[in-house]
Amino acid sequence: MTTHITISKRAQALTSSAIREILKVTERPEVISFAGGLPSPATFPIERMKQATDKVFAECPHAALQYGPTEGFTPLREWIAARHSKNGVTIRPSQVLVVTGSQQALDLLGKVLIDEGSKVLVETPSYLGALQAYSLFQPAFSAMETDEQGIVTDALTPEKLAGARFMYCLPNFQNPTGRRMPLERRQELVRKATEAGVLVVEDDPYGELSYQGEQLPSLLSMNPDNVVYMGSFSKVLAPGLRLGYIIAPEALLGKLVQAKQAADLHTPSFSQRIVYEALQDNFLDQHIPKIRELYSQQCNLMLDALDKYFPAQAKWNRPAGGMFIWVTLPAGIDTGVLLQQAIEQHVAFVPGAPFYATAPQTNTLRLSFVTVPAEKIESGMKTLGALVTAAVAANSAETTTA
Amino acid sequence: MTTHITISKRAQALTSSAIREILKVTERPEVISFAGGLPSPATFPIERMKQATDKVFAECPHAALQYGPTEGFTPLREWIAARHSKNGVTIRPSQVLVVTGSQQALDLLGKVLIDEGSKVLVETPSYLGALQAYSLFQPAFSAMETDEQGIVTDALTPEKLAGARFMYCLPNFQNPTGRRMPLERRQELVRKATEAGVLVVEDDPYGELSYQGEQLPSLLSMNPDNVVYMGSFSKVLAPGLRLGYIIAPEALLGKLVQAKQAADLHTPSFSQRIVYEALQDNFLDQHIPKIRELYSQQCNLMLDALDKYFPAQAKWNRPAGGMFIWVTLPAGIDTGVLLQQAIEQHVAFVPGAPFYATAPQTNTLRLSFVTVPAEKIESGMKTLGALVTAAVAANSAETTTA
């Protein structure tokens, strides 16, 4: 029989995330994949989650299985507000909305803040999932200049900032580059954005994963009236629960709550109550150092392998936290082509191009060092290094010939 | 410090659901509320869910806590496809997308199918949450004529159908009216929509709650190439898990998957695996009859109370399933005003007006008989009946005077 489907203009522009498509290929067990941003399952606190779940079933099973308020489970909102009340700032529970993973925060912010053609400032490169979520609402992206310390605040001129609906920032161990913004730039960024009348959106899934444990003040703490903060339990507990949150000025939070209601009524009561139980007695303060230690070790293994197997013409950063290393190859090398060769040899990574809202740099790539166990990092990087070395040699010969 | 927020046009139009606002007032324990559409917690299969959760923790805790595929957990998709392969139709797992509650299905369908000004056909009245979700994408709603048997298919003229992106239907025990469409009308509806090139969206959270157990064939089964079906575990297991699904032709499903990826990456792996375990050994076939029996009893109690306490000028239906009774009072009575009086006397219901996309009938109201325990139905209805009787008398005096 006949099918009658007309796809909306907004959805016609939608494409599947390049990363998700690559992940499908790399699910084969023989592939050593540095592509995925999946936290190491070795860090999941299974026993703690089990105890928390047992407690919820023993104490409040009916409430955990019933509909709940759109804003989220009140004790969890209180916990989140208290956790972010530091560096001289008080966050009220009424500023907190619990969401179904922080990807949903991106969708809700796009819905509530972006009209067709709205100017939205993004980093170069930026988080692919955000670009994808915002794109549905057809903004005009404007790229902010960046360097190895993140957004170059000197380049945030009045002209650059003028008329922007918001500025999307990942100050801590950014996905995809792993870079972190220093204190002075954070202060300068919040000051300039506020003066220019531009709302700041701070996406912070990796802030807790600082290997040395020291954390820089959030943009939120510098002006909670003009910063929207997005947090997540995916990297400090487990991503399969899909639990994140937004902290926003109450005036904006009300609209986000209405959008959340239309999107899925509320975040599952069941998982909210389980996570709330798991967080008790400062559990994260015991648990997060273990994640930091593992990721720091794996990061060092990958950095050693880069030093050993990658040619001098390749450049990369040395992250102080998070899950990613960003590699830049000589101009002229297309990492999309390189990925095809790598997959044939059972190694995978993510090409950098999809992370750019404008003017993609096709000679870049992202490596994740957290999903693959330590013993496979060396062998995977050896294979990849040989491919990169060959590509650099071929590119250099071509350049010379030309 | 200064706040700088510009709300998108789409979100400016967004208002909080009238029902959710009422629910907040009626959370006080002294209020007997017939307002909420909350399933009776007495029906939640706590022990079964606990066993299923234990099994997931014992057998696959890491996978349950890790990111998963956007489409959903494959065995659950297979289960859903098999469950809907009946009445001569085969549904493939590749047609199934697991979503975070069926409210999310409404949001994704709106995103993927509605452009600003798109014609969308809806029942009069229709489900408020759908009107709210679709409204964000600024469609032009066109109301379909209905009677106590649902959509009047004779009124589905070529002019009415022409150019509509889709037709949104709730054939089983509709929220808010409790009505069910008979077989002949279902066939006629699918035939006419397909001939006119209009996609049918079938929302079916209550189909399993037929008190006598007999179920009419779904619209999906009548033409799976041109019907999108939305199902939910909220009314047959528990709503706090937020688990629903969409069955759609593959061509549309691909776009819905992309929109889902941008919305929240995927439905929680944890809850999908637990529900999948809970469903084994035909659990629903033992469990759903208990829900039907309880709701049928409570429906009868409310119908008895309506007969006893409500005046002859009030009209209502006698549902064969589901959770709601729809009451129509004489023209001139505003149930919004009546609700204020009712809340003062600690009884609540939902006024009917917000359920209309166009031309609201302010003399209607929705009663839910499933959330309030049996012993409170009689006393709550007695209070409400007295208020309605007084309102009818006053209205009749006014009409006579005029």
Image: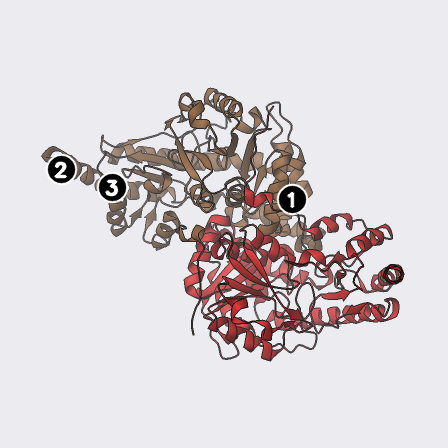
Chain colours: A brown, B red
Badge 3 marks a residue whose secondary structure is loop
Residue A254: percent from left, percent from top: 64, 40
The residue that disc 1 covers is A71
Vertical side of A187 occupied by B266: above or below:
below
Total numbered badges shown on the rendered structure: 3
Question: Residue B264 placed where, x, y %?
Answer: 51, 49
Residue at the spot 45% in from the left edge and 56% down from the top edge: B257
Of A296 and A256, which appears nearest the observer? A256
State yes or no: discs 3 and 1 in contact (Cβ < 8 Å).
no
Q: Residues within 10 Å of mark 2 (few under 14, many from 20)?
A: few
> How packed is label 1: few (under 14 Cα within 10 Å), some, or many (20 or more)?
many
Residue type of the residue flagged with mark 2: Glu
Q: Is residue B115 left or right of residue A223?
A: left
Q: Is residue A185 above or below residue B64?
A: above
Q: Are marks 3 and 1 on the same chain?
A: yes
Which is nearer the N-term, disc 3 or disc 1?
1
Q: Which mark is residue A117?
A: none
Q: Is residue B223 above or below residue B24?
A: below
Assign a secondary structure to mark 1.
Answer: loop
The answer to whether mark 2 and mark 3 are in CB contact below 8 A is no
Res. A334 mark: 3
> In terms of image quadrants, where is residue B179?
bottom right
Quadrant location, the C terminus of chain B: bottom right
Viewed as shown, does residue B155 lie left or right of B377? Answer: left
Mark 2 and mark 1: Cα distance apart in space: 58 Å
Using the image as rendered, state which of residue A279 and residue A129 is in the foreground.
A129
On screen, residue A5 versus residue A334, left or right, reads right
Q: Which residue is mark 2?
A: A398
Q: Earlier in the sequence, mark 2 or mark 1?
A: 1
Label 3 crowd bin: few (<14), some (14–19), many (20+), radius 10 Å: many
Does residue B344 appear anywhere in the picture?
yes
